[in-house]
Image (cartoon, rainbow, N blue to C red):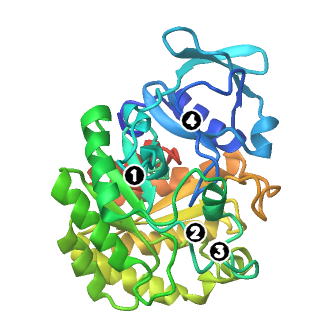
Amino acid sequence: MSVSENVSAKSRQLMTELQSAGLRLADPRAGAASRRGGAGPSDHKAVTVDGVTIMVPVHTSSAWNSPFVASEPDETGASALMRGTIPIASISFPKQPRFYAMQTLDGVPYSHIATLHSADVLATTVLQTCIRYESRRKTCKFCAIGQSLAAGRTIAHKTPEQLAEVARAAVLLDGVKHMVLTTGTPPTPDRGAQVLCESAFAIRAAVDLPIQAQCEPPDDDRWFERMKASGVDTLGMHLEAVTPGVRERIMPGKASVPLARYMNAFNAAVSVFGRGQVNTYILAGLGDSAAAILDASRELIATGVYPFVVPFVPISGTPLEDHPAPSPEFMKSVLIPLGAMLREAGMRSADIKAGCAKCGACSSLSSYEE
Ligand code: SF4
């Protein structure tokens, strides 16, 4: 079930609070292995609340101080969620996917090639290296793309053949419904578009699985046509922050690509992929005001881009590990009006063919579309 379906106001409130505060686990082994490090949001565990699976921070310093505690799961996988010592809901943890037990002929575990996100999304970082990450001065301060590589939990470059093999197994064994192909930014002007095309082409030749590709705006807008022709259904180009000062402070390397280039690229991409089939991650809590996020979202929606606003999660080992996560009140001050804007524009997470804004597990935004 997607986040937007049949979620009561009480569950929506609980999901927003859990994603801000994080969760302490009485049994850290509960459910599928959590993501530590890697590109984008990390240090989460998939948790099912009221039939909806969301990603909740569990390894962050704010999670250690969270008022929410999950009891040890019983034999059915159900766990009592407590606020302090008071049980407030029953939750469960999606099980370890079956494809994690497999490996390629040359001995690479499938879980080092792609991972299960939420309950039914296969996700991979095709290139686990990034020009932005290679310099302390330029790195995006929230990002942990190099951590999982350094820890030997992934490989630097997933080949198209490896991705196709794992995608096929994840569909057959675990019923995954769509796939996210993200990438670190290589030092080439296409910004990774070429490698995303090659990956998508191989995956679509092996299995019928909707794909979202994610990269920085490439040098040439013709890459959008090429990505579509290779089997990419939706595109993510992630602003992360929307105010120039915040962009320069939080992601000094990536901020060298001006907002105006993102807006041009969004326009061109929407004309290829369609209205609502292009999305952008915006991390709330990095310094942008609610008004700035809402102004940017209004412009994005008018362009046909779904602004996927997600609470920032301070990942251990990054320069922002001690930066506070946004409060539930701040998130609601963004998500309630943003949900209304999306509703008015007729843009719905459920209509997106693939990717983060369809999955919706990293933000309770889609529950505010109702
Ligand atoms: S929203 Fe994106 S990053 Fe978050 S769990 Fe879903 S696919 Fe993964």
Task: State which mark lies toward you, 3 or 2.
Answer: 3
The residue singled out by tag 1 in the image is 106
Q: Is mark 3 within 8 Å of ligand 1?
A: no
Q: Which mark is residue 133?
A: 3
Question: Residue flagged by tag 1: what amino acid is it?
Answer: Asp
How dense is the environment of label 1, judged by Cα within 10 Å: few (below 14), some, or many (20 and up)? Answer: few
Disc 1 from disc 3: Cα separation: 29 Å
Disc 4 from disc 3: Cα separation: 25 Å
Question: Residue flagged by tag 3: what amino acid is it?
Answer: Tyr
Task: State which mark lies toward you, 4 or 1.
Answer: 1
The residue singled out by tag 4 in the image is 33
| Mark found first going from the N terminus, 2 or 1 | 1
The residue singled out by tag 2 in the image is 240
- Nearest the eye: 127 or 319: 127
Question: Residue flagged by tag 4: what amino acid is it?
Answer: Ala
| Mark found first going from the N terminus, 2 or 4 | 4
Marks 3 & 2, CB-CB < 8 Å contact: no
Q: Secondary structure at mark 3?
A: loop
Q: Position of residue 250 (x, y in %)?
A: 71, 73
| Mark found first going from the N terminus, 4 or 1 | 4
Task: State which mark lies toward you, 2 or 1.
Answer: 1
| Mark found first going from the N terminus, 4 or 3 | 4
Task: State which mark lies toward you, 1 or 3.
Answer: 1
Q: Is residue 276 visible?
A: no
At x 70%, y 64%, the residue is 286
